[in-house]
């Protein structure tokens, strides 16, 4: 998942990443094919070349060690509003077929006693609303890949074509892919619905369908994803020496 996400980052791009796998993916890109990309954190840290210390939160000291700059959160949100963020990496508890992400809670919100609250979105809403493109990283489970999220924390394509524009969001920005531990989902440009584009070695289309909570559409020719290279794996292990995010 991390190596596939890293491959999506182009050299010279400005990336706004959440805590966890998105940080590993951006660091891997910076230390391999995208050395001139910049990693921005929600609280203001801006790093080139990867993190010297992997942070535990967006305002952890690891986001500032040997950083290129430190800014305010207002500066980061301003960069989003001006369309300067090339890639926003997100994760969450649920994602649906239009790329809407829920990280608020699960249950029936009309009956509060049934709701299990989650840690919350932080800056994930403006990231998905205003980033030029959004990449979603989430392990594949039927309870996570749902027909309709319980709560839209981070808007994807909402309910389909023209939906973002109708609520005042930039219609040319939004999610471009979902990376699971089984494969990659991309979005149909006409319907704005996620479809299965490619799968990892060892996975099958039937496996993915069985772990998806909606009637999944599949590309005519589903591609096989190249496994991580030796260089990618060695670099990733060097980044996460203590196994904080990976084993």
Image (cartoon, rainbow, N blue to C red):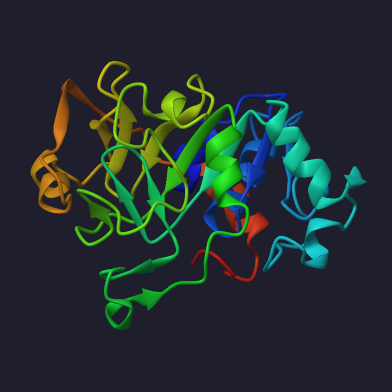
**Residue 170 quadrant:** top right
At x 76% / y 53%, what residue is drawn?
A: 51
Measuring from the top left, give residue 126's x and y in whole percent. 60, 43
**Residue 206 quadrant:** top left
At x 10% / y 40%, what residue is drawn?
A: 215
Residue 48 in sight in this render: no
Q: Nearer the viewer, residue 245 or 70?
A: 70
Q: Is residue 112 above or below residue 125?
A: below
Residue 246 in sight in this render: yes
Q: Is residue 122 above or below residue 47?
A: below
- With 100 as the anchor, is 82 left or right in this view? right
Q: Report how many numbered discs are placed on residues in the image.
A: 0
Q: Is residue 34 above or below residue 113?
A: above
Q: Is residue 103 above or below residue 178?
A: below
Measuring from the top left, give residue 116's x and y in whole percent. 35, 77
Measuring from the top left, give residue 229's x and y in whole percent. 48, 39
Question: Residue lying furthest top in this view?
Answer: 190
- With 170 as the anchor, is 238 left or right in this view? right
Measuring from the top left, give residue 112's x and y in whole percent. 33, 78
Question: Residue lying furthest bottom in this view?
Answer: 113
**Residue 165 quadrant:** top left
Q: Nearer the viewer, residue 193 or 184?
A: 193
């Amino acid at each position: 998942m991390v190596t596939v996400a890293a491959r999506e980052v182009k050299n010279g791009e400005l990336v706004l990443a959440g805590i966890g796998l998105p940080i590993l993916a951006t660091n891997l890109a910076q230390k391999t094919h995208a050395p001139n990309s910049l990693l921005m954190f929600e609280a203001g840290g801006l790093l080139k070349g990867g993190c010297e210390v992997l942070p535990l939160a967006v305002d952890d000291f690891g986001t500032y060690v040997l950083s290129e700059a430190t800014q305010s959160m207002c500066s980061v949100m301003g960069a989003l509003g001006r369309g300067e963020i090339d890639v926003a990496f997100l994760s969450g508890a649920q994602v649906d077929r239009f790329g809407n992400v829920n990280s608020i809670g699960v249950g029936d919100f009309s009956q509060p006693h049934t709701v299990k609250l989650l840690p919350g979105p932080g800056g994930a809403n403006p990231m998905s609303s205003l980033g030029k493109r959004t990449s979603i990283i989430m392990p594949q489970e039927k309870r996570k890949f749902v027909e309709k999220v319980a709560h839209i924390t981070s808007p994807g394509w909402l309910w389909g074509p023209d939906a973002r524009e109708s609520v005042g969001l930039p219609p040319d920005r939004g999610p471009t892919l979902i990376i699971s531990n089984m494969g990659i989902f991309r979005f149909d440009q006409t319907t704005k619905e996620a479809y299965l584009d490619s799968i990892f070695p060892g996975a099958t289309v039937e496996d993915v369908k069985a772990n998806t909570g909606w009637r999944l559409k599949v590309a005519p020719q589903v591609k096989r994803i190249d496994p991580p290279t030796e260089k990618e794996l060695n670099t990733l292990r060097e980044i996460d020496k203590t196994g904080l995010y990976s084993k």
